[in-house]
Image (cartoon, rainbow, N blue to C red):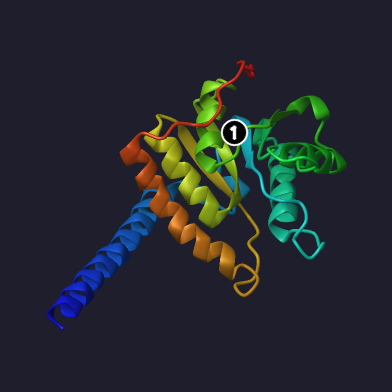
Amino acid sequence: MKLFKKILFTGLIFFGLSVLFVLYANYTIDYEAEDNVTSDIGNLPNEKVGLLLGTSRILANGKPNPYFVNRIKAAAELYHAGRIQNIIASGDNSRKNYNEPEDMKKALIRLGVPADKIYEDFAGFRTLDSVVRAKEIFGQKSFIVISQRFHNERAIYLAHQNGITAYGYNAKDVDKEAGFKTNAREKLARVKVFWDFFFGVEPKFGGEKILIE
């Protein structure tokens, strides 16, 4: 019985500390990014580059992914408003017949963004990779991140921690019910940000530099 109580007590302490860490990670990232994210183009500076963060074009049920659709619209809006001159389409291309950067490029072209203004980053497997590679591979120390607000906040925090000036243009979010799983995963993704910092995790792939002048 005593052993059971010790195990239970230890488990409760671990659970409590875990909850506190999740709260800390989310609060810190929210606070850091608060003044750098907006849904109003007029509140953004003019930048050479917009970093468009990837996601799947199609959902598991075969329907269009609203996160993808809304990010593409936001990126095209920024370009046509003259806030950005180029777009880095950064996403996952690790599986056969799955190519986020190519899907984003095609969708952007359909909305009138010239092909020669779109740079594909095929090694944007995680937000950390996308942000750091925009600096190290594409030569950008300042840019506008394009995704939903929750994602922009994390990307901006990562950018600031890597010596990058970043702003976030918030694409339209999805309704709470449809986005419940995504938002739940985001809470844990923010914890992983601090885990990665602690262990010095770097982007998975480097590559030849493609400087955007």
Query: Is residue 120 in view?
Result: yes
* Residue depicted at x 80% and y 42%: 97
Q: Is residue 101 shown left or right of residue 83?
A: right
Q: Is residue 94 shown left or right of residue 165?
A: right
**Most extreme residue toward the left, as rendered?**
2
Q: Quadrant of residue 96?
A: top right
Q: Measuring from the top left, give residue 6's x and y in whole percent.
A: 16, 74
Amino acid tagged 1: Asn
Q: Quadrant of residue 126?
A: top right
Taking depth in this image into account, of 81 and 160 the one nearest to the observer is 160
Q: Measuring from the top left, give residue 211's x and y in whole percent.
A: 62, 17
Q: Quadrant of residue 45?
A: top right
* Residue depicted at x 51% and y 65%: 184
Taking depth in this image into account, of 204 and 36 the one nearest to the observer is 204
* Residue depicted at x 21% and y 73%: 7
Q: Measuring from the top left, give residue 2's x and y in whole percent.
A: 12, 80
**Most extreme residue toward the right, as rendered?**
110
Q: Is residue 43 shown left or right of residue 174?
A: left
Q: Secondary structure at mark 1?
A: loop
Q: Is residue 51 above or below residue 70?
A: above
- Tell me the quadrant of the picture where the N terminus can be found: bottom left
Mark 1, residue position: 46
